[in-house]
Amino acid sequence: MAQMQDITVPDIGDFDQVDVVEVLVKPGDEVQPEQPLITLESEKASLEVPSPVAGMIKEVLVKVGDKVHEGSLIARVEIAGQAQAEAAQAPPPDQPKGAEELSKAATKAEASFQDKPDQGDAPPIEPPAEDRSKPSAESPTAPSTHAERKPPPDTGHPALDISPHGKPLASPAVRKFARELGVDLSQVHGSGPHGRITQADVQGYVKQQLARPASTAGGGIPPMPQIDFSRFGEIETMPLSRIKRRAGPNLHRSWLNIPHVTQFDEADITELEAFRKSERKASEARGIKLTLLAFLLEACARALRDFPHVNSSLAPDGENLILKKYIHIGVAVDTEDGLLVPVIRDVNRKGINELARETAELAELARARKLKPEQMQGASFTISSLGGIGGTAFTPIINGPEVAILGVSRARMQPQWNEQENRFEPRLMLPLSFSYDHRVIDGADGARFTRHLAGLLGDLRRILL
Ligand code: CAO
């Protein structure tokens, strides 16, 4: 006949009325010795009460919110066959006295509340491995330790992260901490011995979740693995600059929210460059350095006027386009601490010399970290010019909620086929990399825009038309 065993709350020290905060089993569950049945929580700490025997839960007599004390009935277990047989051959009455005392001491130790904050490496409930492997004859209160342990259930998680009961390894204090923060411990990587989850692991997990952009939180994007690179060689940890720390989430947000397409093209700026050089001296006399960027601003302003949806933003409802009647263009400036984007307002109303002067002034302010917030707001389009550095093309990230950005690389003299004269001729070609929001701009329009822009840069007179 099946033998039943009542499981009661063991000696929990001076605590009288303690809350049941978790019931970890239900009728019909098979349990192993040491498998937690319930979690109790006092103001100071928490404790899991393990099953002393292997068997099947017949009845659970507590629920979350109940208050219990030493001796309170938790559950009734039908003792497993083999364990029952062994229980039947109960230890002889003249069992060595020390064994029972040892067992009681062990049970009490397991059951004691942990008042100290968790250090992450002390298994509070499970007895040390060597104790667990001891024959149960030494422990009349846990006869089932003779019963073979089942292998941990296949949870799809690395075996080391899971206790023999299929739960992530963590102390009650860490479980309590995780519960308070609403953290699912099965999602947390344990850095302690045998993959045990520490309080620092839970804190790290929460920080990681908070750092993720709102739209992706829980969006199924797997986090980067946390790797201790010092395992592979010497490392140095250096804080990111404030600018990079602030820009990072914005870039990430744009990258994840905007379906980017980058259209590459080239503009023939042979004549433009000849004109710039011819005007440079005159501009210098007025204290202005006439750079290619000023011409780019002027040409972009005209192209934006001709393609108004490139100078727009998607309405938050995703169903309307907000067309901007102003043309304010942000210019990416490379500073020692990272990228800043001052904004040149009303570009379409300014001449090329004025644009050159203003760009130089704003770039200077950016590098001196003296830009005012309003000087970095309100852009409807952005230009990122890496032409002074080099490169052939790149894929700039849109400065959302703008819908497009123009990347410019270094102009190069290249052979171009002259159909009229049936020969190659050297032309100064400027690489354009135009990233756009594909929800707003079709591929065909993207290509039309860069063709149009290339046409304006190829013959500045077109701007006047
Ligand atoms: N092709 C060939 N030469 C170019 C060129 C191009 N596309 N663009 C600039 N040059 C030349 C300039 O004419 C200048 O030469 P001279 O002194 O002989 O006239 C030289 O390169 C240096 O130019 P510059 O970069 O100092 O000036 P600029 O007006 O072209 O650019 C600014 C100003 C602020 C845009 C630039 O200094 C800068 O910071 N660029 C980096 C932007 C960046 O980091 N973008 C990446 C953002 S990530 O998306």
Image (cartoon, rainbow, N blue to C red):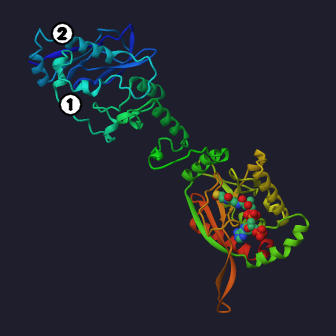
Secondary-structure class at tag 2: helix
Q: Does the residue tagged 1 have its C-beta within 8 Å of any atom of ligand 1?
A: no
Tell me if residue 292 can be seen: no
Residue drawn where x is 30% and y is 12% of the image = 10
Residue drawn where x is 28% and y is 16% of the image = 106
What separation in Å lies between label 1 and label 2 (alpha carbons)?
A: 27 Å
Instruction: Classify 319 as above or below 58.
Output: below
Q: In which quarter of the image is residue 147?
A: top left
Residue drawn where x is 87% and y is 72% of the image = 281
Instruction: Classify 340 as above or below 43.
Output: below
Q: In which quarter of the image is residue 195?
A: top left
Any mark on residue 149, and which? 1
Q: Quadrant of ligand 1?
A: bottom right
Instruction: Classify 380 as above or below 144.
Output: below
Left or right of 119 in this view: 164: left
Secondary-structure class at tag 1: loop
Instruction: Classify 141 as above or below 202.
Output: above
Q: How crowded is mark 2: few (under 14 residues within 10 Å), some or many (20 or more)?
A: few
Residue 189 point in image, percent of width and height: 41, 38
> Residue reaching furthest right?
285
Q: Residues within 10 Å of mark 1 (few under 14, many from 20)?
A: few
Any mark on residue 36, and which? none
Q: Which of marks 1 and 2 is nearer the N terminus?
A: 2
Left or right of 71 in this view: 342: right
Badge 1 amino acid: Arg
Which residue has dot 2 on it? Answer: 97
Quadrant of the frame with the C terminus: bottom right
